[in-house]
Image (tube, rainbow, N blue to C red):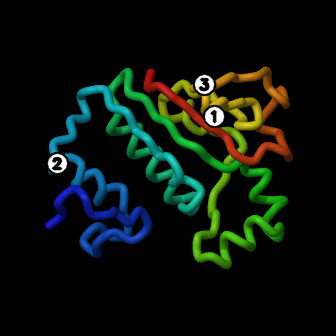
């Protein structure tokens, strides 16, 4: 029996779910008392990079189905162009060698989420300046106007609200 603290495998659910991991973790949430009629906050920090495209799409679709109006979604992700051009680059090779390959990136997370009923704000992490000693976060003007076309942006931070 799942006690709510065990990890959930987003790619390989128990056999009775016929490969539909999103149904498995949905059942776990509902059994733990999750109420999809109440606005929720989904934090996917450090997750999307490591899941294949089809698993991310199924996860975002299921989150959309479970999100009442006013729900929020927050996650970091890799720019899809970086994944395409950098597949043979040292960074991706290094991660794969260490057993934690990056599998997914997307160039237009705003469009992806808009199709699922979310309004998204996408931030290129190059536009952030963090002063930890003073607990100050400064967001600078965008380095690039159209982040979805970027070949330089690596990590994006996405916040979204269910309309």
Real-space CA distance between mark 3 and mark 2, rounded to the nearest whole angstrom: 39 Å
| Pointer 1 with pointer 2, Cβ within 8 A | no
- Please determine whether, in this image, residue 101 is positioned above or below residue 63: below
Give SS at disc 2. loop
How packed mark 2 is, by other alpha carbons closer than 10 Å (few <14, some 14-19, many 20 or more), is few
At horizontal 72% and vertical 35% (from top left) the residue drawn is 124
Sequence order check: which comes first, mark 1 or mark 3?
A: 1
Q: Which residue is mark 1?
A: 111
User: Is the N terminus in the top left, top right, bottom left or bottom right quadrant?
Assistant: bottom left
In this rendering, position of residue 30 left or right of residue 25:
left
Real-space CA distance between mark 1 and mark 2, rounded to the nearest whole angstrom: 32 Å
Observer-nearest residue: 88 or 58? 88
Query: Which mark is nearer the camera, 1 or 3?
Result: 3
| Pointer 1 with pointer 3, Cβ within 8 A | no
Quadrant for residue 115, please give it.
top right
> Residue 39 at what x, y percent from top left?
31, 26
- Please determine whether, in this image, residue 66 is positioned above or below residue 94: above
At horizontal 81% and vertical 30% (from top left) the residue drawn is 146
Give SS at disc 1. helix
- Please determine whether, in this image, residue 141 is positioned above or below residue 123: above
Q: Which residue is mark 3?
A: 134
Q: Which residue is mark 2?
A: 32
> Residue 33 at what x, y percent from top left?
15, 42
> Residue 139 at what x, y percent from top left?
70, 23
Real-space CA distance between mark 1 and mark 3, rounded to the nearest whole angstrom: 35 Å
How packed mark 3 is, by other alpha carbons closer than 10 Å (few <14, some 14-19, many 20 or more), is few
């Amino acid at each position: 029996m799942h006690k709510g603290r065990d990890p959930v495998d987003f790619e390989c659910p128990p056999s009775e779910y016929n490969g539909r991991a999103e149904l498995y973790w949905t059942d776990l949430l509902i059994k733990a008392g999750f109420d999809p009629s109440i606005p929720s906050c989904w934090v996917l920090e450090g997750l999307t990079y490591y899941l294949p495209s089809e698993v991310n799409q199924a996860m975002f679709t299921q989150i959309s189905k479970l999100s009442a109006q006013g729900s929020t979604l927050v996650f970091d992700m890799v720019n899809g162009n970086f994944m395409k051009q950098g597949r043979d680059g040292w960074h991706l090779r290094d991660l794969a060698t260490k057993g934690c390959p990056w599998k997914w990136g997307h160039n237009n997370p705003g469009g992806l989420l808009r199709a699922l009923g979310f309004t998204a704000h996408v931030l290129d992490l190059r536009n952030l300046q963090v002063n930890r000693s003073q607990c100050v976060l400064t967001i600078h003007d965008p380095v690039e106007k159209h982040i979805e076309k970027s070949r330089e942006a690596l990590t994006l931070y996405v916040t979204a609200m269910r309309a």
